Each structure stands twice: as C-alpha cells, then as structure tokens.
Image (cartoon, rainbow, N blue to C red):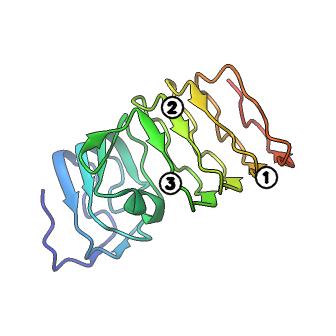
Amino acid sequence: VNLSSNITRLGTQAFENCKLDCLTIPASVTDIHCYAFYNCEVKKLVVNGCRGVDLSSFRSVENLYYDTFDTLMNVGKRPSAANLYIGGEKVNVLVVPEGVTELPESFVTWCESLEEVVLPSTLKKINDYAFQNCTNLKKANLPEGLEKIGSYSFAETAISEVTFPSSLTLINSGAYCK
C-alpha cells in the first residue's frame, strides 16, 4: 500500500486488523489517529519524512524503514520492529549523531537487528524505554555529560558491562533489568 502524497490524515481504524506486505507513509501525513493501525501486522513499513505522528498502534512490524535519522528522531510515537533500516541500510550499529541531546521515549524498541549503539558526547538524557527489549543489543557507550537514564531504557537487552559517567545523576527504575 502506497499512500498518496495528498493524504494528510488517517482516521480511527483506517487499517485495523490488516495484514500488509508493505505500507509507505509519505511526509504529507501529519495526523494519524492512535487506533488507525490497531492490531495491524506489516512486513515492511516505510516512513518518509513524517514528523510528530503516532505509529505506536501497529501490533507487529517486521522491517521498519526510515528515510533519514531525522525522521526516526521526529516521527512521534514509534512502533516496535524486529529490523530497523535508515536510508535503506539495515542498522546493526546505530550511530546517534553529535548534537543530539536527548533520546525520545521508546526510541528503538523490540529491535532484534540492533547490536550496538554509539551515543554522542552531546547526549544529556535517555528517556524511558529507549532501547527496551532490543535483545541482541550488547554494547552502548554512555558518554561523559550524560545526566539521566530513564526507566527500562536498556531493559531486556544483552548488555552485560556498563561504565557509568561521573556526570550521571539519575538511573531510573528498571533501567537495566532482565
């Protein structure tokens, strides 16, 4: 399913209970109702330039494609996906660019392909559930300057060794729970 660039809004239950091979959401979509994709399974979801939209109602996304890292940062609520792609490339090592100061809630969750995260020296805050259930995530550097790790940010990952920076003032509940 390729949505037309004339579409700006997807209403309640627009794709409820659907099973789709591929769905492309264009940048023209600025409003997605929280139940638009309720219980929807998608093998490949392509998100092109969307900002501030809610994609969290997908039940299952096998492959999630973002056109750019900026789209990933600004899409709003994100769905969980087994495999993450940015600019067409599968992401095993996610490099967050310098200048990023905060990672949003549920940034990349349930992502089986993610093995390592490289965080920038400018990062101050990792919000709740940022990398929760990324079961193959083994390594995430915590840069000096980082002040807060949110609840369940690295819960259910494969991280076994952590060096906390001296700048860290808060590690919230369940941050590294198994």
Q: Position of residue 84 (x, y in %)?
A: 35, 41
Direction from residue 83 to residue 26 in the image, left or right: left
Residue type, label 3: Pro
Looking at the rendered image, the disc whose residue lies closer to the viewer, 3 or 2, is: 3
Q: Position of residue 8 (x, y in %)?
A: 26, 79
In the picture of the structure, the residue carrying the numbered disc 1 is: 147
CA distance for labels 2 and 1: 20 Å
**How many neighbours does mark 3 have within 10 angstroms: few (below 14), some (14-19), or many (20 or more)?**
some
**How many neighbours does mark 1 have within 10 angstroms: few (below 14), some (14-19), or many (20 or more)?**
some
Q: Which mark is residue 116?
A: 2
- Pointer 3 with pointer 1, Cβ within 8 A: no
Nearer the N terminus, badge 3 or badge 2?
3
Q: Position of residue 120 (x, y in %)?
A: 60, 50
Q: Which mark is residue 89?
A: none
CA distance for labels 3 and 2: 14 Å
Q: Residue at x 82, y 46 (%)?
A: 168
Q: Position of residue 145 (x, y in %)?
A: 76, 52
Name the element at disc 2: strand
Q: Residue at x 63, y 24 (%)?
A: 159
- Pointer 2 with pointer 1, Cβ within 8 A: no
Nearer the N terminus, badge 2 or badge 1?
2
Task: State the residue in front, 96 or 25.
Answer: 96
CA distance for labels 3 and 1: 18 Å
Q: Which quarter of the figure is the N terminus placed in?
A: bottom left
Name the element at disc 1: loop
The answer to which quarter of the image holds residue 9 is bottom left
In the picture of the structure, the residue carrying the numbered disc 3 is: 97
Q: Residue at x 58, y 28 (%)?
A: 139
Q: Which quarter of the figure is the C terminus placed in?
A: top right
